[in-house]
Amino acid sequence: MTESVGDSKAEVKQATKYVKETENVAEKYSALTVSKNSSDVNMNVGEMPSAAFTAMPTLKSVKKIQFANTEDKQEFSKYPTKAGRRSLSRSISQSSTDSYSSAASYTDSSDDETSPRDKAQRNRDRRTRHVCPDLLEEESPGEKPLAGAKIVGCTHITAQTAVLIETLVALGAQCRWTACNIYSTQNEVAAALAETGVPVFAWKGESEDDFWWCIDRCVNTEGWQANMILDDGGDLTHWVYKKYPSVFKKVRGIVEESVTGVHRLYQLSKAGKLCVPAMNVNDSVTKQKFDNLYCCRESILDGLKRTTDIMFGGKQVVVCGYGEVGKGCCTALKALGAIVCITEIDPICALQACMDGFRVVKLSEVIRQMDVVITCTGNKNVVTREQLDRMKNGCIVCNMGHSNTEIDVASLRSPELTWERVRSQVDHIIWPDGKRVVLLAEGRLLNLSCSTVPTFVLSITATTQALALIELYNAPEGRYKQDVYLLPKKMDEYVASLHLPNFDAHLTELSDEQAKYMGLNKNGPFKPNYYRY
């Protein structure tokens, strides 16, 4: 027993040493990156000396695992090798480029010879595997549907995003990447991507100036011009449109996955200024229902628990907005015993909230009683300074929408208020009378700034993004005009079918008689575009 305890302490000590080494690497990385204004101003992340990216080699310093007994060693041996374990962690579900190349039509039945059920059955023996470049080459040897594509991306830089980038590269694309959020970047992931040759301009904790500098360096480089944009929030699209109009006009397509970014695209389209086709991934069913609803249902609790250790039972919570994100947040909070009310501008969403058992109120009516205020509207100034002044002591304020405009954080940076950083991403704003309001992530996206999101859900979103990029890049001239398009319904269904084997789900097939009666193709699409899931 004493030896076992001694071994455990040794392992904890070794693990602590490794964490400290990793943190030191992150500090070196940040220091080198922040020095962009020095003589090395033209050096991008992908070109930095290896000293800036030594996160991966630090793994070599960890001692070999010592097993207390033979049974533990045998149990560990059941799992795959290091390379195999990395493949298992990859996020984008297995697929073949055959089903989404430009040769396929999403309006006729020429590519409908294989039903979603057949595809699911064919992949069942590999249900635990996720797509990665190696698997993609196995499924589609020699096929490069993105050959010649030069993709500039602005998303959260996480391990899941890294797999998406690796997959795009395996499909033939050249990529340059930056972050859409100043707090969500995982430095070790940025370092690992740079080691593979993908230029990355991002680090955790950027300033506003750093943020726009990174976007500019990602776009503006000699001898390389982007022809595809993958955006999350619209900041990259806006920057290219404003600063590099000649580049913008030559882009073959834009893929956008957030409410804020899609709103900006529709504004450009309405004004007649959108000169390239764009794909609205945010409103695809697989994005709306899974990333927005199911993902936020879990990650809202994770983010709040990690930052505040709050107990939800009996707490008064107001959620601003009852879209898919709001629905997910409310469901989770209610399940843990919180007393939840809703603010809404849309009568349909408000009626849904009422039918789901939530009070629909005005924020000004309840702000004094609330323990937690959560915004998820995609709008600006949802929580104003006047409302912040009226909050009770200890009220927690956070944002689950993409943009940091929903909470009027700028008004809190005034001489009469004191900011106190109590832990990473947690600030106490102290009023002259001693009242404290707890602000999380400075009003930015809570789940990706303060915690993580489920890999499986991101797999669905990343698969959708990859399909949209391939479709726009390979679409024949004239298929898409200078407008914003929704993901084709059949493509949505295909993404869903790829993920069903993870649940050992078995789809029912229509008989010929049933298909004829319903006026459907047996292989889909099964719902019209106007159908609301």
Image: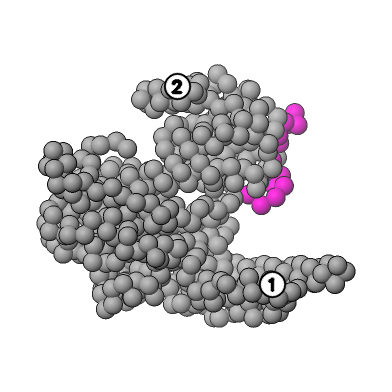
Q: Is residue 427 left or right of residue 270?
A: right
Q: Quadrant of the C terminus?
A: top left
Q: Position of residue 413 (x, y in %)?
A: 61, 40
Residue beneath the point at 32% across and 60% down: 121
**What are the residue bounds of the magenta stretch?**
419-437
- Identify the mark at residue 354; answer none if there is no mark: 2
Q: Is residue 498 visible?
A: yes
Is 141 in the magenta? no
Question: Where is mark 1, residue-wise?
Answer: 71
Identify which residue, 335 or 402, lies in the foreground.
335
Mark 2: secondary structure: helix
| Residue 262 occupies quadrant | top left
| Residue 470 occupies quadrant | bottom left
Q: Is residue 64 left or right of residue 161?
A: right
Q: How is the image coloured?
A: one colour
Q: Position of residue 352 (x, y in %)?
A: 40, 26
